[in-house]
Image (cartoon, rainbow, N blue to C red):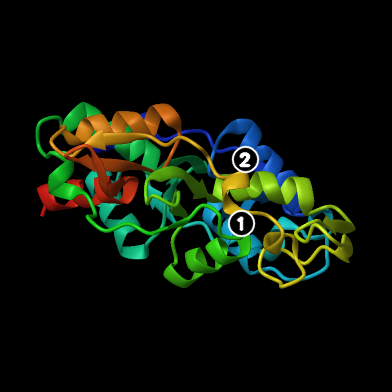
Amino acid sequence: MSHLSELILIAKKPITIKRNASLSNVISELIKNNISRLIVTDENIPIGIVTEKDLGLFLLNDDSEKNLDEIHVSSIMNKITSVDDSMSIEKCVEVMLEKDIGSLGVSTNDKGLVGIITKTDIAEHYIKKYSGKHTVGDIMTISYMSMNSEESLKNVVSKMIENKISRIFLKNKMDEPEGILTFRDLFHVALEQGNTDVVLDNSDDTVSIVFTRKGFLSESGFGNTIQARDVMTKTFESVDFEEDLTVACEAMVQNRINGVGVRINGKLGGVVSKTDILKAIYIDNK
């Protein structure tokens, strides 16, 4: 199989959104299609890309009083990084790692952008081509970020920003994993609360305060009135560190998630992500 046909084979037709679409529209499309990025177009011409990470970081940092219907996707989109359709998948992995991005546009000389390749596509490629090469323990990140599930959403979000992470494990008072908080969880909260002109603060049983929406981080924003456990995903996928790395890939692909926990002697001992899958391919092709 040639590099040309191999790259075209795994690339997917991109789902698009118009540049004047609101962030509410963007979140709805991401959730509806269970995807992590959209190509932004102007009169059907691709002009940028918006990812789950872009949107998540914006929502985490936003302390404005604008509701999400007032903010256009063009204000947070980024430039599309594209590669020629003749490039090898292994070279695509190198470009993605070098630029720290989760997707590449695939272009041809005569048609322009014809598809998009993502970390999910790379994980599927790993399952087919690299079985038996690595165990989960070979590639996993041993450390992982966690907080108490009873912390306010504001405090947990602040920790995610501080450490530049898109997921954080949440534990109960006995230090046992209870759930995980990801950008996707925050998107659901943003849709529910982010277009409300006022939010009712019931954090104090003796008084109710009505205030304007000010995002996740403001002292008077809705992030300070919600516990992380109220919006976390209460279950998360995990694999044993002795499993073949393809098992972790399959868990991520099937569940449309970017990372899974790693069990060491039955306890959560680390994580493995799609970025780690890219690193494994890169190591094998150095």
Residue 38 visible within the image = no
Quarter placement of the C terminus: bottom left
As drawn, 23 above or below 114: below
Dot 2 alpha-carbon crowd within 10 angstroms: few under 14, some 14 to 19, many 20 or more: some
**SS under mark 2:** helix
Residue at the far front in the pictured view = 206
Residue 70 in the image: x percent, y percent? 84, 59
Kindly indicate whether the residue at mark 2 contacts the one at mark 1 (C-beta within 8 angstroms).
Answer: yes
**SS under mark 1:** helix
- Sequence-wise first label, 1 or 2: 2
Task: State how many labels appear.
Answer: 2
Q: Amino acid at mark 1?
A: Leu
Residue 253 in the image: x percent, y percent? 38, 31
Which residue is identified by label 2?
30
Q: CA distance from mark 1 to mark 2?
A: 10 Å
Q: Nearer the viewer, residue 1 or 50?
A: 50
Residue 243 in the image: x percent, y percent? 16, 32
Residue 134 in the image: x percent, y percent? 11, 40
Q: Name the mark on residue 55.
A: 1
As drawn, 171 above or below 217: above
Residue sitting at 76 percent across and 45 percent down?
A: 192
As drawn, 244 above or below 232: above
Residue sitting at 87 percent across and 62 percent down?
A: 207
Quarter placement of the N terminus: top left
Q: Amino acid at mark 2?
A: Leu
